[in-house]
């Protein structure tokens, strides 16, 4: 039996973004081997076990781990999440090392978080290691900065500093060098992994839609006639470009006044987007 250990900090069924990536990668890897162990956060356990009652994964063994309560209370929302994640990675190294002594893993695969600038300490174990897909190497064009809110501009500068610090973390560089295969979500991230001396790099999207989800999307009826509706869903973050969509729609609706632009979501940019719709006259 080929034994694979997966690290998936974010891993939840029925969700998108990082949790959906973690869950669907586990499901797909489990199709190709009878021995899969997954280390994920303990707070993911209820939703995972509830889903497994209806859709079991009999060849997957789940290992739940979280830091002590005193280290978790201040991690609410995005506050402190990256520090917590870094410490969590250290914690699962010792857990995985104990597991390896009895299981003897053939492969370790880091799946989530999908970022290249924080290490996976599992790369230090004497087991072939796959890293990714990891991303985060992309930067917004400088010409876009003038369209960002003050919060967005500060975020971009802090993000650039954080990536620079991450790239100079010896453990992060060790992760890149020890990976037998580093999967990058984009060419930009691949170039950064190359500078970090990753031996073998391939570009692969992190998107992990299941075949069931794709089939469900295919059943959505195609609407014809007016009004012409555009739909945008997601967290309202500056780097997702909702404001650019609004600016483009404002030009579109001048020629096609029956058009509608629906935005579904919430987030820190909500007030800025609401103000922009009024300024553009599309509220």
Image (cartoon, rainbow, N blue to C red):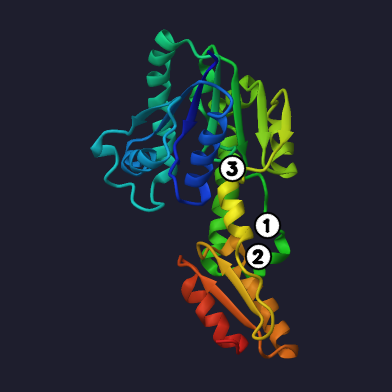
Image vertical order of residue 175 relative to residue 277, above or below: above
Location of mark 1 (residue): 140
Image vertical order of residue 37 relative to residue 216, above or below: above
Report the mark closest to the observer, 1 or 2.
Answer: 1
Tag 2 or tag 1, which sits nearer the N-term?
1
Regarding residue 209, the answer to whether it shows in the image is no
Disc 1 to disc 2, C-alpha distance? 8 Å
Secondary element at image label 2: helix
User: How many numbered badges does the structure rendering display?
Assistant: 3
Left or right side of 269 for 203: right
User: 55 or 106: nearer the eye?
Assistant: 55
Whole-percent x, y for residue 16 in the image: 51, 52
Whole-percent x, y for residue 30 in the image: 53, 29
Location of mark 2 (residue): 145
Which residue does the image show at 38% across and 38% down from the upper left? Answer: 52
Q: Circles 1 and 2: CB distance less than 8 Å?
A: yes
**Where's the C terminus, which quadrant?**
bottom right
Location of mark 3 (residue): 163
Tag 2 or tag 3, which sits nearer the N-term?
2
Regarding residue 221, the answer to whether it shows in the image is yes
Secondary element at image label 3: helix
């Amino acid at each position: 039996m080929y034994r694979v250990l997966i690290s998936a900090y974010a891993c939840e069924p029925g969700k998108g973004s990082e949790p959906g990536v973690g869950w669907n990668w586990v499901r797909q890897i489990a199709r190709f081997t009878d021995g899969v162990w997954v280390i994920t956060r303990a707070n993911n356990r209820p939703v995972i076990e509830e889903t497994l009652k209806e859709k079991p994964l009999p060849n997957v063994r789940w290992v739940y781990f979280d830091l002590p309560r005193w280290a978790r209370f201040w991690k609410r929302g995005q506050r402190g999440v990256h520090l917590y994640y870094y410490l969590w990675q250290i914690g699962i190294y010792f857990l995985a090392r104990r597991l390896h002594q009895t299981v003897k893993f053939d492969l370790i695969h880091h799946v989530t978080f999908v970022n290249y600038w924080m290490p996976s300490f599992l790369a230090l174990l004497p087991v072939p290691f796959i890293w990714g897909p990891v991303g985060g190497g992309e930067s917004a064009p400088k010409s876009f900065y003038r369209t960002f809110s003050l919060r967005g501009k500060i975020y971009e500068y802090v993000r650039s500093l954080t990536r620079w610090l991450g790239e100079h973390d010896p453990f992060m560089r060790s992760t890149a060098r020890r990976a037998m295969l580093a999967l990058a979500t984009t060419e930009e991230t691949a170039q950064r992994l190359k500078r970090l001396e990753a031996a073998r790099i391939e570009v692969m999207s992190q998107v992990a839609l299941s075949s069931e989800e794709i089939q469900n999307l295919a059943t959505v009826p195609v609407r014809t006639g007016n009004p012409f509706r555009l739909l945008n869903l997601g967290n309202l973050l500056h780097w997702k470009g909702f404001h650019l969509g609004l600016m483009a729609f404002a030009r579109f609706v001048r020629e096609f006044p029956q058009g509608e632009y629906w935005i579904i979501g919430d987030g820190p940019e909500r007030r800025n987007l609401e103000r922009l719709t009024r300024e553009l006259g599309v509220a």
